[in-house]
Amino acid sequence: MAFSFTLTPEQQQLQSSTREFARTVLRPLAQRVAAEPDPLTRALLTRPAFEQGVAAGMLSSLIPPAVGGTGGRGIDAAVAIEEVAAEFPDYFINMAGPLIALMPVYAAGTPEQIERFVRPFLATSRAPLAAMAFSEPEGSANFDAPPPAGVQTTAVPDGDVYVINGRKAWASFLSGWDGDGPDIMTIVCRAPGGVSVIVAEREHLAGHIEVEEHYDLPGLRGCLTSRVRLHDMRVPKTNLIGAEGDGIRLTRNAFLPSGASIGVFATGAMRRAFDIAWEFATTDSRGGSSPIINHQSVADVLANAKGRIEATRLLSWRAMDAVLGGHPAGAEWALHSKIFGSDTALSVVNELVQAVGVTAYDMKHPLMTILNTVLAYPIIEGGNIGIRRRQLQAMLADPSYDPSATLSH
């Protein structure tokens, strides 16, 4: 990999076109979503823009070229994600289900499974959805614990099928657009051989998924995040990914790209918050004789925020490049991006709110929307405390760990 901090002309064009789409289509959509009180209605408002993105190739860009997609380097993904995240991160989170749900398929699926499960997401029309049914209402930080703890969703063999029962939560669009589930649901469950990954398709989900609740989230309000019950779902044994018992490894690896992406989401959120706070500081005097940027305390907050934004961007873009490029240290880069990026965003946005002052303490103020959004980043895609820091601890404690591995390119 050539080492450069300069975007190619193609990446600059990607940045420009995605920014235009984000500002002209997603910013007004985000305002409409924010004004809608019902979680399901909010999510359905995003469908036309979702279909527009599919038609423009955004969905297929999440799929590696080796299996028919148009995905490029991790830097390309980071460039596009940051532009979307600065305006309406909910949109990309909704669309990016395949980024997690298909990872186990790429890693351990048969050629037939890969072709069948990937096919819906190469479309240039409709609004196909994928969901990784991992988290459970009782908590999943210890999903790999032996019974009776750990994963509670069960897959019981019955002839040529598994009968799946259990409850899942938090992943976007577990219910699909219509309550009958997404196009594919990658289910982390407990089979006789241990924690396993089984892919259910629409034909298996319909009529066997019950929506218990659509969560009313304080941030990321355009994401349809639900708690569902899977009951007596019959899925062919041929939909098992790898072997029974492979689920722990496959599940952990599935969240590497999404972990890296959280740092990019955090960068987008901080960037937007900075723009708002900087505009306020350079134009509003708060009753004084000059704009508040002329007060050193305000200028210091802005300067510190900008430096941390730039640092997070470099880290998270490098993490995306490492993970999607198969760098040996990609797992570590992803963990740093997730932990450092999300923690930094929460701190930076909170400080920018303070720089603006009480004017920002209003649900109609855009900084409140951003603050409620970044509150989610340390706890989604594997909570920093319950999962991600524990993974990093295990990595550092491993006798084979090489502290210099991240220096190689």
Image: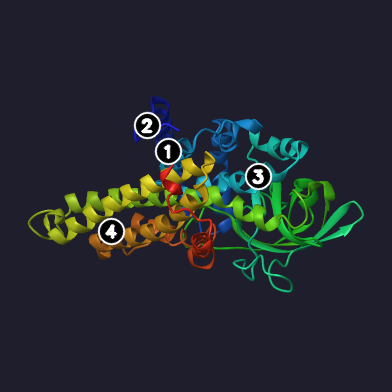
Q: CA distance from mark 2 to mark 4?
A: 29 Å
Q: Would you identify the image quadrant in which residue 50 lies?
A: top right
Asked if the residue under mark 1 is in contact with the one under mark 4, i.e. CB atoms within 8 Å, the reply is no
Marked residue nearer the N-terminal end (3 or 2): 2
Q: Mark 2 against mark 4, which lies toward the viewer?
A: 2
Residue 7 is tagged as 2
Residue designated by label 1: 79
Q: CA distance from mark 2 to mark 1?
A: 9 Å
Q: Mark 3 against mark 4, which lies toward the viewer?
A: 3
Q: CA distance from mark 3 to mark 2?
A: 28 Å
Residue designated by label 4: 352
Residue 217 is tagged as none
Q: Is disc 2 surrounded by few (<14), some (14 to 19) or many (20+) residues within 10 Å?
A: some
SS category of the residue bearing label 2: loop
x, y percent for residue 221: 50, 56
Residue designated by label 3: 102
SS category of the residue bearing label 1: helix
- Is residue 14 in view from this perspective? yes
Q: Would you identify the image quadrant in which residue 364 lies?
A: bottom left
Task: Give the residue type that dot 2 points to.
Answer: Leu
SS category of the residue bearing label 3: loop
Q: Residue at x 48, y 42 (%)?
A: 322
Asked if the residue under mark 1 is in contact with the one under mark 2, i.e. CB atoms within 8 Å, the reply is yes
Residue 201 as seen in the image, left or right of residue 135: right
Q: Residue at x 76, y 50 (%)?
A: 200
Q: Residue furthest bottom?
A: 148
Task: Give the residue type that dot 4 points to.
Answer: Leu
Task: Give the residue type that dot 1 points to.
Answer: Val
